[in-house]
Image (tube, rainbow, N blue to C red):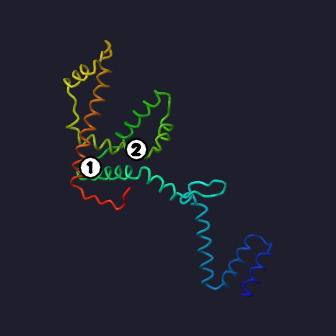
Amino acid sequence: MNEVKKDVTELSSVSEPESSNIEKLKMFIKKINPKIATIVAVVMIVGVSGYFYRGLFVAATVNGSPISRFAVISKLEKTSGKQALDALITQKLIVAEMDKNNINASDDDVAADIKKIEDQVTAQGGTLSQALIAQGMTITDLRDQLAINNRLEKYLADKIQISADEISQYIKDNNIVVPKGQEVQFNEQIVSQLRLNKLNQAAQALIDSLQAKASIKYLVNY
């Protein structure tokens, strides 16, 4: 043990070039008990990993006191855990059904949907990035969600068709006055709204059916 302390002292007092220091460090490690060397290496690795990947474990610090990501997750689970879990279950059921029926969304379809959203947000004086931050989403999250929506629309295409009679009835029921010369624009907006209404109804019916047939076991109760 005294020899190890002596070697440490000698090593710490060296003021030679870095390459020489490295060689001396290698020689010093060889003299250490293999078990001790392994422990030192593990501690160093854990320490370095903890520094570079600290965001994986610590969400924030307040005056040096850490708030762990586990604490954040626990808080979120208590406040909205069931809602989030149910949403993930629903998503998994839908994706599985789309996969089974070979219903896919192309990159072009998703890109077109993102462009529509971006145009709408821009028209309101905002940006897509700001809108995503406000929703706590990333562009990847948006793409994934739009891909699922696109696949769902294709799967339910025969259930969300809109007829001319339905457009006329919607205008009548809602006392809409269509300005002359703007019939096309108004019709497109009405069709979009009616399709969305039908899609929501058909999607809910599908989800209810999938849940009834699925084996869902809750391992955590919120």
Position of residue 86 measured from the top left corner of the image (x, y, whole percent): 34, 51
Residue drawn at (46%, 52%) of the image: 76
Q: Amino acid at mark 1?
A: Met
Q: Nearer the viewer, residue 144 or 168?
A: 168
The disc label shown at residue 98, or none = 1
| Vertical comparison of 16 with 33: above or below | above
Secondary element type, mark 1: helix
Q: Which residue is mark 2?
A: 143
Mark 2 closeness class: few <14, some 14–19, many ≥20 residues within 10 Å: some
Image-based side of 6 in relation to 129, left or right = right
**Total count of labels:** 2
Relative image position of residue 205 (x, y in whole percent): 23, 43
Q: Amino acid at mark 2?
A: Arg
Mark 1: give few (<14), some (14-19) or many (20+) Cα within 10 Å.
Answer: some
Is residue 89 rendered to the left or right of residue 63?
A: left
Measured Cα–Cα span from mark 1 to mark 2: 16 Å
Q: Quadrant of residue 7?
A: bottom right
- For the point 76% across and 77% down, the residue is 11
